Image (spheres, rainbow, N blue to C red):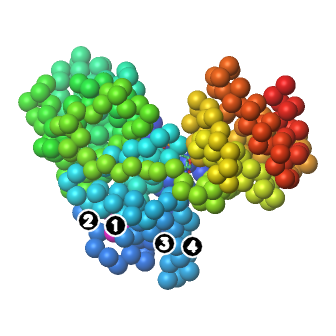
Amino acid sequence: MTVPETTTVSAHKDTSDALRPHAEHAFAAELAALAAADDRPRPARWLLSPWAVARYLLGGTLPDGTVITPKYVGPRRIVEVAVSTLATDRALLLLGVPGTAKTWLSEHLAAAVSGDSTLLVQGTAGTPEEAIRYGWNYAQLLAHGPSREALVAGPVMRAMTEGATARIEELTRIPADVQDTLITILSEKTLPIPELGEEVQAVQGFNLIATANDRDRGVNELSSALRRRFNTVVLPLPATADAEVDIVTRRVDQIGRSLDLPAVPDGVDEIRRVVTVFRELRDGVTADGRTKLKSPSGTLSTAEAISVVTGGLALAAHFGDGVLRPADVAAGILGAVVRDPAADRVVWQEYLETVVRERDGWKDFYRACREVSA
Ligand SMILES: Nc1ncnc2c1ncn2[C@@H]1O[C@H](COP(=O)(O)OP(=O)(O)O)[C@@H](O)[C@H]1O
Ligand SMILES: [Mg+2]
């Protein structure tokens, strides 16, 4: 009998035309330059020192002139606490409202620390224990009984044996009894395999990053036993409009290049407009603090601003004159604001007539919004 050659499904190859390459591939050159310049002590199995990981996330220029692009725009201290937590025996919990870069930061942390951001469990209401622990290759199991060969390690188990960073997305969506699987893993650093009478012990370098949504609070609140194993870092919304414009501009530029959208150089005014609208509606007050507003039901996050602008760029590139115009973003904004067709529409109309219409230089935008709102 011949044993079929195993095919590796996981994407450790550098597939350069991947629609969305993993961070460790997309930023391989930056990571290599950092590793070369990094002479500080590295925790066991870390590819970089904590200092260099923070530099990778926050950006900067290396002594040899290599420019490291900022990945996370926000308080330096947040990044420092997150990175140093990973060098301790406590796991890291990134908490925040949607679109505050929890997933983004977790991916880049794993890429910089372990060179592998793919040891990932996506948390849902249906996530089974096997997704966190291990499963079985049933053909092997039936043919030979339970054995190490029949066991299919999950991402967390692999991170334990490789001394790497595991990631769990949306931890609080996972049912409480499944979450509790993590307690032994995080406190004892072992994963029992009762079927084999064995256990897997985590080696140095293993740690875990979980993300959880503020808005899911109460869905499957973390048990206090589990919460104690985590250091929680709360990610804030961008503090200023300038910071948010900066984040959106950077990401849109990156996404635009990966989608081969023609560069749209003069889009900054429109980006600032999208960010202003989102921030004013989110905050319930105009930027000058003068007019109170009602907030719609959607989150109007930075991430949504990024998709509105990316959608606008595609319109401008393929159906416009290549310059991002008010009409290219109006429909996207409407779609993000009006989630609930009744209540949100009222909020939007009020904002349109009392704020947008009266504002200097917003005539074209007002007209474009009227056209799509009709
Ligand atoms: N402070 C920030 N710094 C850098 N990028 C940010 C920031 N806030 C949001 N983003 C961008 O917005 C998107 C956030 O999406 P994501 O990480 O999926 O959010 P979350 O997981 O918190 O819901 C990413 O594309 C990220 O680049
Ligand atoms: Mg997320």
Contact between labelled residues 4 and 2, with CB atoms less than 8 Å apart? no
Q: CA distance from mark 3 to mark 2?
A: 19 Å
Looking at the picture, tell me which residue is in the foreground, 355 or 180.
Answer: 355
| Quarter assignment of residue 269 | bottom right
The residue labelled by disc 3 is: 33
Q: For the residues carrying marks 4 and 3, which lies nearer the camera in this image? A: 4
Say which of marks 3 and 1 sits in front: 1
| Numbered disc 2: secondary structure | loop
Instruction: Write down the region rendered in magenta.
Output: 45-50
Residue found 19% across the figure and 40% down from its top: 185
Name the spot of residue 58 as percent of width and height, x first.
Answer: 48, 65
* Type of the residue with mark 4: Val
Answer with mark 1 or mark 4, whichever residue precedes in sequence: 1
Residue beneath disc 1: 50
Q: Which residue is mark 4?
A: 67
Residue 328 within the magenta-colored segment of the rendering: no
Q: Amino acid at mark 3?
A: Ala
Q: Residues within 10 Å of mark 1 (few under 14, many from 20)?
A: many
